[in-house]
Image (tube, grey):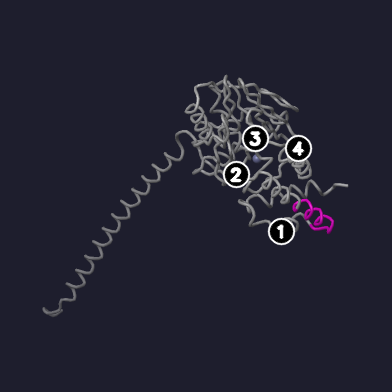
Amino acid sequence: MAVTDISWLRCGIGTLCRRICRIVCHLVCHIGATLCFAAGLVHADVEHEGALPVAEVAPGIFVHSGHQEVSTAHNHGDICNVGFVVGSRCVAVVDTGGSIVIGRRLRAAVKATTALPICYVINTHIHPDHIFGNAAFKEDKPTFVGHVNLAAAMAARGRNYRNALIRDVGADVAESEIIPPTQPVADLYDIDLGDRILKLRAWPTAHTNNDLTIYDEKTGTLWLSDLLMIGHTPVVDGSLTGWLKVIGDVAQEQPERVVPGHGSAANWRQALAAEESYLRVLLNETRAAIKAKKTMQQAIDSVGWQEKDKWLLFEEFHRRNVTASYAELEWED
Ligand SMILES: [Zn+2]
């Protein structure tokens, strides 16, 4: 190597530069990641603690709008509409959210609104996003109210629902519990919150075999829960034909306003018509598929896909709707 050859120096400087670069990069990445992680934690704290935001949709009627998502570690099962009704004597909570975390946040919203005790916790049906916050209200010693079929549905599905919840949402919702109703409703049942009567109605099998609605006489508010799903693909877990019949009955009602189980709409009648239309497509096309001797898989691949862009979470729920419809309609006369 000649004395004048300084390529080693260039090479050395290059290597040094690259090393410094790498160290700086690494530090920047590390600090960046730490900041991101910290920001994530702060975000998670804001997201998962404190009172659920609620809107007073009519005097004394408070509703929290859940996300239009499936339950995840991020949303903690805050995926359906929940709320509460305040009388002059006490409070009725309507559905409790998809985990103990959401139940606690709903309870915090009640406590931030009124000092009155929580005397009733009403579950509108079995689905996990509506019931897994129940345990948050145990200390209030409320009457738990549900459809006469709800306890049996909870006994049949509770364990699997809970396993799926821990799997999908995580160990921090492990205190979520199945709490069956202490007051079953077989037909009609009135609850008196003090200067406020809630008229509960247990429906024949429709969205599930344990759908319960709540009508507040004072404000003309009808809490339909998942008998009306807006945005979210309707979920057939009871009977397709039964649900269509019940929709016919619900359409006869003349409430001032309606609270759906998912989503919201300025015009509830239009939303109910959209839901009915989807269910009719399921009914007609599944019947046609069975008549044409299509297999269940062929029906799943062909029935109702033109509805896809009208609904959220279609991929998650439509196939199981066709499966349920096929099983229900396969042996009809
Ligand atoms: Zn539901």
Between marks 1 and 4 in the image, the one whose residue lies nearer the viewer? 4
Secondary structure under tag 3 reads strand
Distance (Cα) linking label 1 and label 3: 35 Å
Please name the predominant secondary structure of the magenta segment in the image: helix
Q: Mark 2 and mark 4: span between their CA atoms?
A: 24 Å
Name the front one of labels 2 and 4. Answer: 2
Kind of residue at badge 2: Ser
Q: Which residue is mark 4?
A: 205
> Which residue lies at the image location 66% right of the left edge and 43% below the top edge?
268
**Amino acid residing under circle 3:** Trp
User: Badge 4: few (under 14), some or many (20 or more) residues near its Cα, within 10 Å?
Assistant: some
Residue sitting nearer the eye, 73 or 141: 141
Distance Cα–Cα, label 2 vs label 1: 30 Å
**Which of 297/202 is in front?**
202
The residue tagged 3 is 223
Mark 1 or 3, closer to the camera:
3
Identify the mark at residue 264; answer none if there is no mark: 2
Q: Which residue is mark 1?
A: 301
Q: Nearer the viewer, mark 3 or mark 4?
A: 3
Q: Earlier in the sequence, mark 1 or mark 4?
A: 4
- Kindly indicate whether the residue at mark 1 contacts the one at mark 2 (C-beta within 8 angstroms): no
Q: Quadrant of residue 7?
A: bottom left
Of the pair 215 and 285, the residue shown nearer to us: 215
In the rendered image, residue 91, in percent from the top left (x then y), is placed at: 57, 24
Residue found at x 11% / y 78%: 3
Cα distance between the residues tagged 3 and 4: 17 Å
